[in-house]
Amino acid sequence: MKTAVFCFVLAAMSGLVVQADEVKKANKKKATTEGKIEFRSHVPEAAATKAELRESIPLAEWKWLEHDGMKIAVGVYVLPSFGESYIDVYGYVYNRHFKEWRQFCIAKTRNAGHVEVLLDPKQGFVKVIGAANNRLKGKTVVMWNIAALSDGRAYVK
């Protein structure tokens, strides 16, 4: 009798495990087919136009910069959160040879609260400065040296 009960319990438990795995697979398939995919998985590495870039990260605020003929786009996306702030900063440069915007960086900030994107033409930097009323106010959170970027101008005749 004990063996029969044990086998029944074991069979029931293994059935639950199989059923749980099937539910997980179904939920995963449902999530991907219904478009419920994490936001960051759809950030493009390249976009043909400014409009395409804006549409790919629709909630980001964009700043369009130009330095020494190089076109740079910086998108600031404030993720919804409670408590500390989460801000993603996306950097793109327009590649003249391929005629598209190419991503050069994604920076994920924490506790900045609010940021401003500035171009320092004298030093050749794009800076993301803290702008909230906290310890990062006025401080550089992210900085890119424009000389380290390439817009493909060497390949354009």
Image (spheres, grey):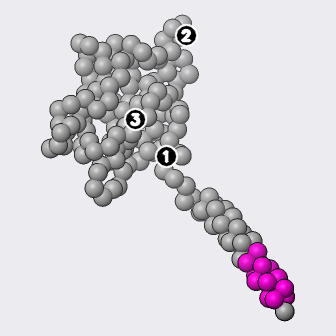
Tell me the CA gap for discs 2 and 3.
Answer: 28 Å
Kind of residue sitting beneath label 3: Ala
Q: Disc number at residue 107?
A: 3
Kind of residue sitting beneath label 2: Tyr
Q: Residue 118 in the image: x percent, y percent?
A: 25, 28
Q: Which residue is drawn at 80% across and 80% down?
A: 11
Q: In this view, does 130 lie above or below 33?
A: above
Relative side of 114 to 59, left or right: left
What secondary structure do most residues of the magenta stretch adopt? helix
Q: Disc number at residue 40?
A: 1
Q: Disc number at residue 77?
A: none
What span is colored magenta in the figure?
Answer: 2-15
Tell me the CA gap for discs 1 and 3.
Answer: 12 Å
Q: Which of marks 2 and 3 is nearer the N terminus?
A: 3
Q: Would you say residue 14 sits in the magenta stretch?
A: yes
Q: Residue 136 in the image: x percent, y percent?
A: 21, 37
Q: Disc number at residue 155?
A: 2
Quadrant of residue 144 in the image?
A: top left
Dot 3 lies on which element? strand
Q: Is residue 61 above or below residue 38?
A: above
Q: Quadrant of the C terminus?
A: top right
Relative side of 136 to 41, left or right: left
Q: Earlier in the sequence, mark 1 or mark 3?
A: 1
- The reply to whether callout 2 and callout 3 are in contact (CB within 8 Å) is no
Q: Would you say residue 92 sits in the magenta stretch?
A: no
Q: Residue furthest bottom?
A: 1
Q: Residue at x 47, y 33 (%)?
A: 49
Q: Residue at x 57, y 58 (%)?
A: 35
Q: Is residue 77 above or below residue 20?
A: above
Kind of residue sitting beneath label 1: Arg
Tell me the CA gap for discs 2 and 1.
Answer: 31 Å
- The answer to whether one can see residue 50 in this image is no
